[in-house]
């Protein structure tokens, strides 16, 4: 298998869009192609994440139309659906096809217009990635899933629930602080100075999670250009290499065992580390799937950055902040930046690449630039997990 | 004549791979029964039903009825509901006394939902009927449990 590099990235403003999904994706794709200095003729295939386009705009098969709108010619163009992990799953497959030698240059990314659906219908359609025969009739929602996980976290690690809620609040405070500094974020210049009381006293969505424990519904797109690593320097002086990928699947929540240690997240992260021949201690920066505050804590532990039950206190103590042991979600994460579900994985990659070039927003940029970064993207209630490890140097 | 006889193809089609279907599981719930499967290979119980044992993957399973007794593992109060549901209500996970964990609703006024309930004994007390929408393949039921003091 060949090494694969990212040579260009693009990202729309996240929030409420007035443009169609096709236009949003085109914007991100053209930005990425300009960034890479490639023309449409050079793109050999398109891998597009999109979770719910049928419900948003009555559009299925959006990837073919995206390729057509970009005048890429009759190239293979495939939509990937892994709920909120759709873009990461698309990128992982794109990496595989380039690594296999089938294509030299491809476009990957994702798009979503979740805000368009309104809260009640968006909540319904998001819940479609729960187990439909048994979880749909209950009326389970995603905040509900993570609310149940938060209660288990409190039990497993013997933390009084009110104390855990305060520790979780630090995830929201941190991610909103960085989202408020990120001009592409949904909450740019908003909520950058939250207090613990603001988070725990906000309106309850699913006890014990409040609105400020949750990411928003969002519209937006992000895209990247991937290239055979041997050819990457023809296009850029700063290629970022995909060193490892992981993908794993889960089942119905009731059959997942311990909700604080979902096996799909553990296995996916491990396989990415194995492929990259790296360990958590090697990673300088994380963009992880903080769909809810508790989700960030569970992810940090499943990926091996903290021991079981230790991420809550570590977060409270600033270990995941800029200058801490492992800066996490310096883009604002899903909570501060927004979560257009089909685009999120590509957005995570975009921000790791920007960090490696020293181009993240002031107040969010790591100094010195990170050598290794990692993404974590979750689809459904632990149904689809994907991890990508990126680096500024090729594998040895 | 080239090709395979239609009768042979039809015979293959008639082979049953599902010992307890979701429809039969729901029908059981409507009759007040929590149905599951006992694995003839490892002896453990699968519930909700699957085509193979949820523990060992064996296909050799027989239908059985669970007691409806269990322990409350976790729960939440949904305050923001999906289209088609009226908040508040209380989803929960129950560890049945036979072993498998199932998703259900808890029959509890939302204002009484407190963390101390986790670990309490619960018993199946009925069903919640979801009328369904355009995307749900019809109406469905889920089990409802209540706390046993």
Image: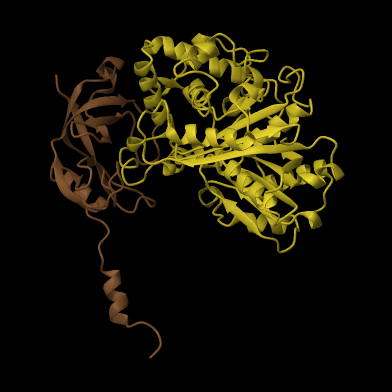
Chain colours: A yellow, B brown
Q: Position of residue A334 (x, y in %)?
A: 58, 29
Q: Name, please, the residue furthest toward the bottom.
A: B1
The quarter of the picture where residue B147 lies is: top left
Q: Is residue B108 visible?
A: yes
Q: Position of residue A233 (x, y in %)?
A: 84, 42
Q: Determine the residue positioned at 63% across, 44% down.
A: A91
The quarter of the picture where residue A383 lies is: top left
Out of B119 and A389, give the one closest to the viewer. Answer: A389
The answer to whether residue B120 is above or below residue B40 is above
Relative side of A234 to A273, left or right: right
Position of the C terminus of chain B by quadrant: top left
The answer to whether residue A280 is above or below residue B5 is above
Q: Is residue A187 visible?
A: no
Relative side of B30 to A344, left or right: left
Out of B135 and B26, give the one closest to the viewer. Answer: B26
Out of A255 and B137, give the one closest to the viewer. Answer: A255
Q: Position of residue A251 (x, y in %)?
A: 39, 41
Position of the N terminus of chain B by quadrant: bottom left
Q: Determine the residue positioned at 60% across, 39% down.
A: A245
């Amino acid at each position: 298998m060949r090494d694969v590099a990212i040579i260009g990235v693009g990202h729309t403003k996240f929030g409420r869009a007035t443009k169609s999904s096709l236009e949003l994706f085109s914007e991100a794709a053209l930005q990425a192609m300009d960034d890479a200095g490639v023309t449409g003729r050079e793109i050999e295939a398109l891998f597009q994440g999109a979770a719910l386009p049928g419900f948003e705009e009555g559009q299925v098969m959006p990837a073919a139309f995206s390729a057509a709108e970009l005048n890429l010619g009759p190239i293979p163009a495939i939509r990937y659906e892994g709920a909120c992990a759709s873009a990461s799953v698309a990128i992982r497959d794109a990496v595989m096809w380039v690594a296999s030698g089938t294509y030299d240059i491809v476009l990957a990314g994702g798009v979503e217009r979740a805000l368009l659906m309104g809260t009640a219908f968006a909540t319904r359609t998001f819940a479609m990635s729960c187990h439909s025969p048994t979880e749909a009739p209950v009326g389970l929602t995603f905040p509900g899933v993570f609310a149940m996980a938060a209660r288990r976290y409190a039990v497993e690690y013997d933390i009084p629930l009110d104390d855990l809620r305060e520790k979780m609040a630090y995830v929201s405070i941190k991610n909103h602080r960085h989202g408020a500094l990120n001009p592409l974020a949904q909450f740019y210049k908003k909520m950058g100075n939250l207090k613990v009381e603001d988070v725990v006293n906000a309106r309850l969505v699913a006890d014990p999670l409040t609105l400020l424990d949750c990411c928003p519904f969002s519209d937006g797109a992000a895209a990247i250009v991937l290239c055979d690593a041997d050819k990457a320097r023809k296009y850029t002086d700063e290629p970022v290499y995909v060193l490892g990928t992981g993908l794993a699947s889960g089942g119905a929540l009731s059959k997942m065992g311990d909700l604080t240690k979902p096996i799909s997240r553990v296995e996916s992260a491990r396989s990415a580390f194995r492929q990259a021949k790296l360990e958590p201690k090697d990673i300088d920066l994380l963009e992880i799937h903080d769909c809810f505050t508790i989700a960030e804590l569970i992810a940090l532990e499943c990926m091996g950055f903290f021991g079981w039950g230790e991420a809550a206190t570590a977060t409270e103590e600033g270990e995941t902040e800029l200058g801490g042991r492992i800066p996490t979600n310096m883009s604002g994460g899903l909570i501060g930046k927004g979560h257009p579900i089909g685009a999120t994985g590509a957005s995570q990659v975009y921000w790791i690449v920007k960090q490696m070039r020293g181009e993240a927003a002031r107040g969010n940029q790591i100094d010195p630039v990170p050598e290794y970064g990692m993404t974590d993207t979750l689809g459904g209630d632990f149904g689809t997990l994907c991890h990508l490890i990126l680096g500024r140097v090729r594998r040895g | 004549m080239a090709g395979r006889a239609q009768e042979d193809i039809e015979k293959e089609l008639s082979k049953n791979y599902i010992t307890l279907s979701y429809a039969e599981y729901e029908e059981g719930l409507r009759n007040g029964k929590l149905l599951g499967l006992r694995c003839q290979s490892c002896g453990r119980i699968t519930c909700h039903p699957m085509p193979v044992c949820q523990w060992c993957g064996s296909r050799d399973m027989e239908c059985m009825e669970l007691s409806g007794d269990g322990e409350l593992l976790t729960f939440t109060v949904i305050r923001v509901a999906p289209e088609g549901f009226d908040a508040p209500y209380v989803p929960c996970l129950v560890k049945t006394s036979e072993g498998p964990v199932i998703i259900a609703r808890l029959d509890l006024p939302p204002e009484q939902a407190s963390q101390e309930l986790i670990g309490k004994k619960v018993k199946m007390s009925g069903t919640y009927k979801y009328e369904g929408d355009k995307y749900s393949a019809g109406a469905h039921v889920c089990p409802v449990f209540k706390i046993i003091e």
